[in-house]
């Protein structure tokens, strides 16, 4: 039973890792906590639901959600955060602004899609698979593999491409990066686009897994992703992945041994313990000097 719950936690934890990576990408380059990330996650799920309702098919719905959510994050940076940075506004001002954006997105979703819980189609259904005596559903396996592939793609982009090099240079020293011909503003905007893509992929996968979408779904998911990012060391991509898996396993074990009512509390407990014992996270440093 324990091994089965651990496997379930790993499958779900990969989605939390995607959300956590979205936090880490933005924090790594701007030292800003994007507290609108949870609402953007919900936005991505609703964009996929809209595409499904239009009978575009699930692959097209997935792609539509990724693109529109990425664009939304870019707009948030271009319209709200970039002008604040141009005025050298303190981080607390930017933080308050993104919190405001979070509520705006959430309420707009309620106006357009209403506040009720809506049915979302199952993404994959090719039966169950037994691995080492543990039965896993097709939805779990597909969710794990898609999240893993996307995380690998992000790692390649950040660590092995010119854009990734520009992102790392912009993080280390924006002024020097500008002098070297890097358009830091565009790099920051691209980083927000990647963060939005992470949120969209996670939102669609979770919606397909639970077969449910609702406007406030990002509140709890955002907390779990944030806890995972802090646990791994916010700003450290591989740390976010490890943190997501740990939060997923902890949640699965809590549900198995303590009951479903402890599901939401698990992320709070993990976050509290990390901040108490090691505030910089498992792989982070006090100044969070790497992505």
Image (spheres, rainbow, N blue to C red):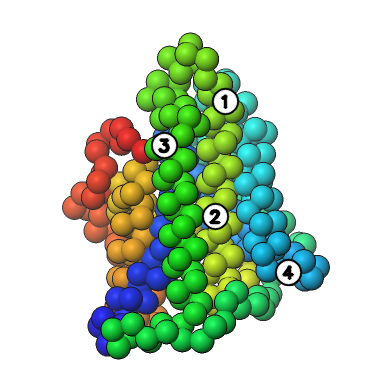
Res 234 visible:
no
What crowding class fits label 1: few (fewer than 14 Cα within 10 Å), some (14-19), or many (20 or more)?
A: some
Query: Which is nearer the N-term, disc 3 or disc 4?
Result: 4
Q: Quadrant of the N terminus?
A: bottom left
Estimate the x, y position of residue 259 in percent, counting from the top left: 35, 85
Q: Nearer the viewer, residue 101 or 154?
A: 154
- Provide the secondary structure element on which disc 3 rests: helix
Estimate the x, y position of residue 85 in percent, counting from the top left: 55, 25
| Left-right relation of 140 to 71 | left
Estimate the x, y position of residue 207 in percent, counting from the top left: 58, 71
What crowding class fits label 2: few (fewer than 14 Cα within 10 Å), some (14-19), or many (20 or more)?
A: many
Mark 2 in CB contact with mark 3 (< 8 angstroms):
no
- Inter-mark Cα distance, 2 to 3: 22 Å
- Inter-mark Cα distance, 3 to 4: 33 Å
Residue identified by numbered label 1: 185
Residue identified by numbered label 3: 160
- Provide the secondary structure element on which disc 2 rests: helix
- Provide the secondary structure element on which disc 1 rests: helix
């Amino acid at each position: 039973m324990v091994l089965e719950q651990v496997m379930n936690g790993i499958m779900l934890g990969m989605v939390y890792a995607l959300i956590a990576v979205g936090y880490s990408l933005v924090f790594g380059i701007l030292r800003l906590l994007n507290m609108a990330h949870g609402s953007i996650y919900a936005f991505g799920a609703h964009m996929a639901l809209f595409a499904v309702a239009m009978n575009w098919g699930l692959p097209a719905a997935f792609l539509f959600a990724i693109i529109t959510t990425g664009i939304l994050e870019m707009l948030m940076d271009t319209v709200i955060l970039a002008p604040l940075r141009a005025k050298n506004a303190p981080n607390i001002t930017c933080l308050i602004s993104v919190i405001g954006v979070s509520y705006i997105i959430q309420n707009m979703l309620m106006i357009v899609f209403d506040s009720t819980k809506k049915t979302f189609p199952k993404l994959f259904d090719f039966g169950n698979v037994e691995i080492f005596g543990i039965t896993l559903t097709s939805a779990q396996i597909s969710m794990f593999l898609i999240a893993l592939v996307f995380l690998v793609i992000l790692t390649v982009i950040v660590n092995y491409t010119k854009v990734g090099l520009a992102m790392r240079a912009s993080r280390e020293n924006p002024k020097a990066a500008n002098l070297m011909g890097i358009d830091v503003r565009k790099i920051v905007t691209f980083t927000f686009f990647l963060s939005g893509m992470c949120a969209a992929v996670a939102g669609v996968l979770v919606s397909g897994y639970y077969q449910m979408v609702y406007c406030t779904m990002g509140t709890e998911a955002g907390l779990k992703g944030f806890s995972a990012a802090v646990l791994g060391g916010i700003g450290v991509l591989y740390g976010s992945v490890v943190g997501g898996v740990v939060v997923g396993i902890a949640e699965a074990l809590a549900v198995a041994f303590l009951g479903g009512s402890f599901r939401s509390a698990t992320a709070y407990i993990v976050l509290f313990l990390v901040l108490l014992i090691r505030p910089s996270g498992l792989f982070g440093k006090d100044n969070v000097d790497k992505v």
